[in-house]
Image (spheres, rainbow, N blue to C red):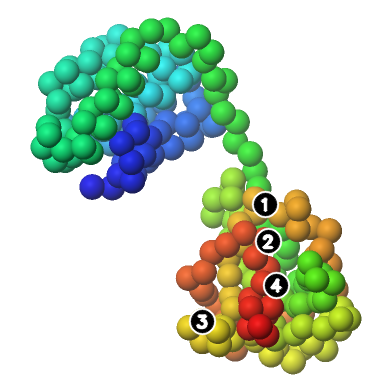
Amino acid sequence: MGAWGVGIRQDDFVCDVEGAFEDQLKDGKTIDEATRFVHEHFANAVNDCDDGPLFWLALADMQWKYSNLDQAVLRRVIEIVDADTGMERWGQPSDKLYEQRKAALKKFRNKISQPNPKPSRPPRRVIRAPRFQTGDCLSIRLENGQYSAALVLGTDHSNPEQGMDLVGELNYLSDNPPTLDVFTERRWLKLTHDDGSLSVWWFYSMGFRKMKPRITVLGNTPIVNTDPEATSYFGGWHLLGQQILRQRE
């Protein structure tokens, strides 16, 4: 079960349906067009015993959120809630989790049975490009006043709303900013305080604003074949420079 809570939106599949619905709205489609799209895109799930009820809950949630709840969708949700359809995934009626989920569904049913008093505006697509260029040499001023260094190894534009930078941290910690020689030497920081891997991270575009005053691009250097190319680490920009401090501790 891809759920992490009893709430309607605390489910992976529900999030997938709602994300697809809102992506259509971001592209300028109407509620009806977005509804047709998710029906087609998730056609195999609509009549599935597990995902089917979740599909109708997600669709109703989105339609109501934007104040255009189809009455046929409302009736389907009422049937699902009143018949306890899909509740077997939550255990037995005497189980606490089952009771919590049922209560959440009833609350949701009651909410969408009334017109939305404050419908949301259709979302707009916000473009967030990667913050740097491949090969940018970064000087990072840490909170303690010292400096660390990192090299931008690549960028990812595949999600226009969430560009990412692949950044490798160098084994540099000083009271003075790094020079370009530091980036030429390529002394990568190894996480000896952790699993021994190189400190290479994908940094999301969001959350960069607070960190921006502490990062300076000193120049740009070509990426070579021996540079790291991938990582399983993802993080926010506030983490940049923290690994060198932890290692030195």
* Residues tagged 1 and 2 counted as in contact (Cβ below 8 A): yes
Q: Which residue is mark 1?
A: 207
Distance from the alpha carbon under mark 2 to that under mark 3: 19 Å
| Residue 44 visible in the snapshot | no
| Amino acid type for the residue under numbered disc 4 | Gly
Give the mark, 4 or 1, whose residue is nearer the N terminus: 1
Q: Identify whether 41 is placed above or below 239.
A: above
Picture coordinates of residue 29, whole percent (x, y)? 49, 24
- Please tell me how crowded label 4 is: few (under 14), some (14-19), or many (20+) other residues with Cα within 10 Å: many
Distance from the alpha carbon under mark 1 to that under mark 2: 8 Å
Residue at image coords 17%, 18%: 82
Disc ID at residue 238: 2
Q: Identify whether 228 is placed above or below 22.
A: below
Disc ID at residue 194: 3
- Please tell me how crowded label 2 is: few (under 14), some (14-19), or many (20+) other residues with Cα within 10 Å: some
Helix or strand or loop: what does disc 2 sit on?
A: helix
* Residues tagged 4 and 3 counted as in contact (Cβ below 8 A): no
Distance from the alpha carbon under mark 3 to that under mark 1: 25 Å
Picture coordinates of residue 136, whole percent (x, y)? 76, 72
- Could you say which is closer to the camera, residue 18 or residue 210? 210
